[in-house]
Structure formats: C-alpha cells, structure tokens
Image (cartoon, rainbow, N blue to C red):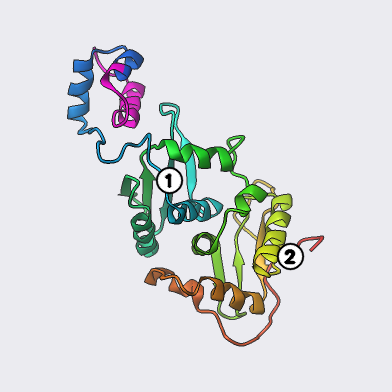
Amino acid sequence: MAWKKEEVEYLKNNFADSSDTDLSKNLNKSPNSIRIKASRLNLKKYSSINRGNLELNKEEEQIIIGGLLGDLHCRKTKTSINARLEGGHGAEQKGYLIYKMELLRNLNWIIWKSKNGTYHYQSKSYACLNYYHNLFYPNNKKIVNQEILNKVERLGLLIWFMDDGCYRKRDKNSSIYTNCFSYYEQTLMKDWFDKKWGLSPKIYTAKDPKNTDGNVRYYLAFSVKDTIKLRDLVKDFEIPDCMSYKFRFADYIYQNPTPGILAIHN
C-alpha cells in the first residue's frame, strides 16, 4: 500500500526515538514495511543521544532563551509529540548560524539554503524542547513574561542582541527590535533591564513602511551611556566576525535623538 504524505512526515519525525511496534500501531503498517521505508528515506535510530532523554546544560538553555526572545522559533508539528527549534539567517550571517550550531551541538540539525540565499536551520524534535514551547507559546503565540526574563543571563542577553539588536554608528546608541511583543510586554522588558542590569531603555514605536496590517510595533532604545554599559555586559564573550558590526560601540558620550516616535508612559 502506498504511503501517504502525512504518514511519511510522521515517520521522519518519530522514527529516531520510537519503537517499531509503536510506529506500526500508529501508522497501521507492518514493522517490516516501516523498516523498509525508513531505510529508503535514510532514517536512523539514535543510540548515543536519546532524543527523549536529552538534558540541556545552562549554556544551551541561555542560547535557546536568548534566541527565542529574538529570531528563533520553537514549534510542534502535527505529526510529532515533541517540539523543535527553527530559524533562518541571510548569507552574510552564515557565520553566526554556525556559531549557534556549535554551541547547540548536542542537538541534531538540518541546514539548507533557499533560492533567495537565506540559510534555514531546523533541529530534530526533542522532549526537552517542550518546556520552551510551553514557556514561550502558551496560546500558540510567542510571548515574553517575567518568568522568561528572570531566566536570562549575560549569554542569553548576547544572543538576544545579536538576533534583534542594532547599533547606530552615527548616533552611538543601540536598540533591540522587540516588535513582535505587545506594549505591556515592552514595559515588562523595560523594567527588567532597569532592575536586572541598571539600564533604562525607552519604548519607541517603529517606523516600518512594510507594516500593512495596521498593528503598532515597538522597540527598545538605549542611550549612549546604556549602550556602553550593554557592551560591557557581554564583552567577555567571543562573537563571530560577521556580527562584530553590532558591537562597535563608542567609548565617549554623543547623544542624538533616537529615530522613531517615543511611546507614551516611559
């Protein structure tokens, strides 16, 4: 009997850490049929790293949390009980992608290049990633709350800034583009930066000519003094050469207005 597309997808997502008996039961196919199909798809069982039992260390947790505050996504497919990580970077940031893959080398990754030159990356599904999916996507929409912010340390802050941070050479200040979060979430992040790091970002509304849905988007803007403090918080970490442009912070004070419209209640 021919395999349906959804059956093949289920096999790809679950073959590595599911028994042939369970796969046979869930797919209504014989174990022999499953093994033959898996062989043709070059699917293999994981023995050295069991995806159901993998535990992340503190460094890996910071990479993931910082990434999820930025451009990283955590997703569950319809055919898998466990979550996976995924994202993408332009060709000029390929070195940053490799940098993150090295730090998360205990996860198994697939990387491919699209026709427009973007590099996409996707992990296999792991039980340990369900925690981050539940934490950041309680209603299938990415959020930030105090529980998440309380977990962020310097390495997580570094990854967050490399994902969504921006340094303005002319004005000597910086921003983190937090525009997927609500105004209330912006206030949580603003207060967290103040209490945790002694930084006082302002909330600005973003000027985005591509914004056609009518929703207001925000970002956090840091003064020149706070930009220097921000640099000092992460200066001990090695960063890939392709991201060095985000850290060419000035050591002197030169204040210009931040582009954008200052949001209310700062």
Residue occupying the far bottom of the picture: 252
Find residue 7 and report its image quarter: top left
Instruction: Tell me the tag on residue 261.
Output: 2
Instruction: Tell me the tag on residue 264.
Output: none
Q: Which residues are magenta?
A: 1-21
Q: Is residue 255 left or right of residue 156?
A: right
> As rendered, which of 252 and 65 lies closer to the eye?
65
Q: Is residue 2 magenta?
A: yes
Q: Position of residue 8 (x, y in %)?
A: 30, 25
Find residue 263 and report its image quarter: bottom right
Q: Quadrant of the N terminus?
A: top left
**Residue at left offset 28%, top offset 16%:** 21
Find residue 172 and report its image quarter: bottom right
Whichever of callouts 1 and 2 sits on the residue coming sooner in the sequence is 1
Q: Position of residue 92 (x, y in %)?
A: 38, 65
Q: How many marks?
A: 2
Secondary structure of the residue carrying numbered label 2: strand
Amino acid found under the numbered disc labelled 1: Glu
**Residue at left offset 43%, top offset 44%:** 85
Q: How far separated are the C-alphas under marks 1 and 2?
A: 32 Å
Instruction: Tell me the tag on residue 86.
Output: 1
Vertical side of 5 occupied by 139: above or below: below
Q: Position of residue 13 (x, y in %)?
A: 34, 31
Question: In front of the other: label 1 or label 2?
Answer: 1
Vertical side of 87 occupied by 35: above or below: above
Q: For the residue carrying disc 1, how many other residues have a C-alpha within 10 Å: few (<14), some (14-19), or many (20+)? A: some
Q: Is residue 169 magenta?
A: no
Q: Quadrant of the C terminus?
A: bottom right
Amino acid found under the numbered disc labelled 2: Ile
Q: Position of residue 195 (x, y in %)?
A: 70, 64
